[in-house]
Amino acid sequence: MIAGGGATRYGGAPKGLFEVGGRRVIDRVVDALKESTGRDPILIANDPGAREWSPLEVHADIEPGMGSLGGILSAVELAAPVICVAWDMPFVPAALLKELVGLLGDADVAIPESDSSPRGVEPLCAAYGPACGPAIRAALARGDQRAIAFHREVRVARLPLDRVLQYGDPGVLFFNVNTPEDLKRAESLCRVPG
């Protein structure tokens, strides 16, 4: 699980600690990861207070200041194969994560397609194998910090959009709580039946 970005939008408060539907977002993500892998996730977080957020094993970025790609690199080098999920995605289902893990047998990256992402995929809800480490380091060395910067150098399996839609609307599945308005919307999405 990757914690990062945007806390300034909440006056410095860590956004994954906010509650959606009566539960902290971080706890929702932890439950989905545990159910999909059968083990406790690790938390990649640079906040000095991160060890107080939950009983998870916490690690700072191996290469600080590299954004989301630095978080993915840290997770890969510490625990690959690994599923990375942003800690501000309260609605990611464990079944979708399990399917991504299954795709890693023939790929280095297993990533869901999404019609709600400008990239067409969701790199902060994806599975990564060990071969991603060197490819990410090469991307960072050339100054490319995009979360998909290394995809040309590895085998990528995309979970097709029609398959993703079987788990729900990508706009909800991969919804990020980035602003106070997003938090209100997430709360209203919790009340929607189904």
Image (cartoon, rainbow, N blue to C red):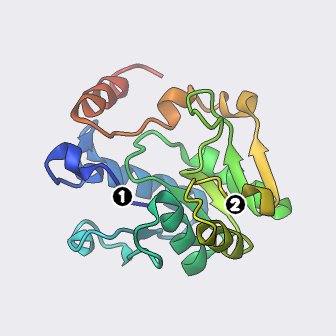
Q: Secondary structure at mark 2?
A: loop
Residue 176 in the figure: left or right of residue 92: left
Viewer-nearest residue: 35 or 167: 167
Above or below for 76 versus 29: below
Callout 2 crowding tier (Cα within 10 Å): few <14, some 14–19, many ≥20: many
In the orientation shown, which residue stands out farthest toward the left?
11
Mark 1 residue element: loop
Number of labels in the image equals 2
Q: Is residue 11 left or right of residue 180?
A: left
Q: Which residue is mark 1?
A: 4
Q: Which residue is mark 2?
A: 150
Which of pointers 2 and 1 lies earlier in the amino acid sequence? Answer: 1
Report the residue that reaches farthest toward the front. 142
106 relative to 191, above or below: below
Q: Residue at x 40, y 68 (%)?
A: 65
Callout 1 amino acid: Gly
Looking at the rendering, which quadrant does residue 176 occupy?
Answer: top left
Q: Residue at x 57, y 64 (%)?
A: 143
Q: Residue furthest right?
A: 106
Location of residue 79 in the rendering, given as x and y in whole percent from the top left corner: 58, 77
